[in-house]
Image: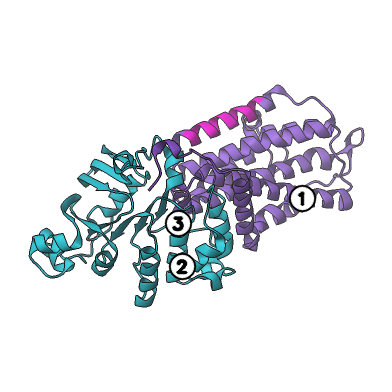
Chain colours: A purple, B cyan
Amino acid sequence: MTTTTTTIQARRPGAAAWLRMIQAEAKMITRDTSGMIVPLGLPVLLLVMQGMMFDDLHQEVGPGVTVLDVYALPVVITLVLAMVAMMNFPSFLATYRKTHILRRLAVTPASPVMVLVAQIVVSFIQVLLGMAIAFGIALIFFDANLPTDVPMAVMVLLASSVAMYALGIMVASVAPTPNAAIAIGIVVFFGTAALGGMFGPVENLPDTLAEIGAWLPFGAAVEAFQSTWLGETVAWQNWTSLAATTLIGTGVAAALFRWE
Amino acid sequence: MTATRTPLATDAQHLVKRYKTKTAVDGISLQVPAGQTFGILGSNGAGKTTTVEMIAGLRRPTQGHVRILGLDPFADRAKVRQVLGVQLQQATLHDALTVRELVDLYRSFYPKPLDADQALTMVELQEKAKTKFSNLSGGQMQRLSIALALIGQPEVVILDELTTGLDPKARRRVWSTIESLEDQTVILISHAMDEVERLCDRVALIDAGKIIAQGTPDQLKAQAGVPTLEDAFVELTGKDLHDDQEED
């Protein structure tokens, strides 16, 4: 034995390991095709459902902006993001905990944080693909328009994604089992989404509930996306809500997350 | 390197692990010099796995401390993970990945990993390189698990219940793999007497969270005045090795 304590280097896995981990997660997803139905198929379904809810889809609500653009598309985008981030993603993570994959990785130089990041990357790629498919269909078949302020829409997408995945990590951190993760995810999802306009325009809700819904991340994301379609400034309340959600989600997760 | 400057491969001092209602490990101390194969033998529920999880840095001891090559598994985690390979009981892998993909994934974590083909050949899985983990037999999963514990060329390897659930042929294959590890320190957790007797230089007998006896297999047999290690275990602990209790 020639090793002494001084010669042992504290090395962290490099870029190649991160890439392998992301590839591993991607293969886990693509080889279980049923797992891709929610992120890739659901957006199209939601788009069609939203399309059926409005009978005046093509009425203009602003110059070059229709009811579809302002009321349907922001809800579809936010729904996809929220469903995948709050329900789909935490259940995968909880499964890894249950089957001790995280524990196995915990005894290698790879921190289990790598799995978390790799899962979010792969999950988010699916969200983007799902949105791209839905958007393509909306543009071709529903005569949808792109947001008036595309860079701001991208910013809103990023901020909403961070907030929704923070809630997802929070769900994963408090859920003892994969089934619990799905159950808690559903409650969090419907709680925020119903008040945020999933089942119809928020204007139909009583004022107080609509006000609460606008402060929750789902409503905030929908409103922020609507602003980017209308070319209006995104309200500070929307940014505040998304930032607060991110802080609360990651804070709870940091305090309660268990690797096994 | 002189012997006096080389830290012990594993030094566990007065380890205690208490849960709300029970004490799983009650003052265990182990010193394993580099290059030795050390067996931890005990019946189910004796505290073997809890002990080894504390040594591996997976569970914090209530009292006591552990050093791996002089390093604290918690404070020096990043260093310890470079030199310690662990095969866990009840751990699964990304099951949609193939054997080769898993080997490549785990290789990427280490600076000087074993060659992938060499690792697969060592555990005789080269024919299964393209098979998904979920399609492997229990023995093949176990052999892959051993290969992955050794993939980073660790100086210390912990192997928990090495051959549990394997058929006799598979057990002998795994034993040959372990016997071929000449430079590494191996800590073997087992309740299989023949395995411990064949592979281990020294053995600690654990019962009810305590070390009952420690020594070479021959010393333990002599201490108990019996011809086999199994008899020695029964004699020294007063228990059957195969008591079917829940493992902690």
Residue type at mark 3? Leu
Residue matched to label 2: B123
CB-based contact (under 8 Å), mark 2 and mark 3? no
- Residue A163, percent across and down? 62, 35
Q: On screen, B109 above or below B62? A: below
The residue carrying pointer 3 sits among few (fewer than 14), some (14 to 19) or many (20 or more) residues within 10 Å by Cα, namely: many
- Residue A69, percent across and down? 83, 40
- Residue A104, percent across and down? 45, 52
Foreground pick, A204 / B42: B42
Q: Residue at x 40, y 66 (%)?
A: B177
Residue matched to label 1: A47
Residue matched to label 3: B150
Residue type at mark 1? Leu
In the image, the segment drawn in magenta is A240-254
CA–CA distance between discs 2 and 1?
52 Å
Foreground pick, B188 / B25: B188
Question: Mark 3 or mark 2, which is nearer the start of the sequence?
Answer: 2
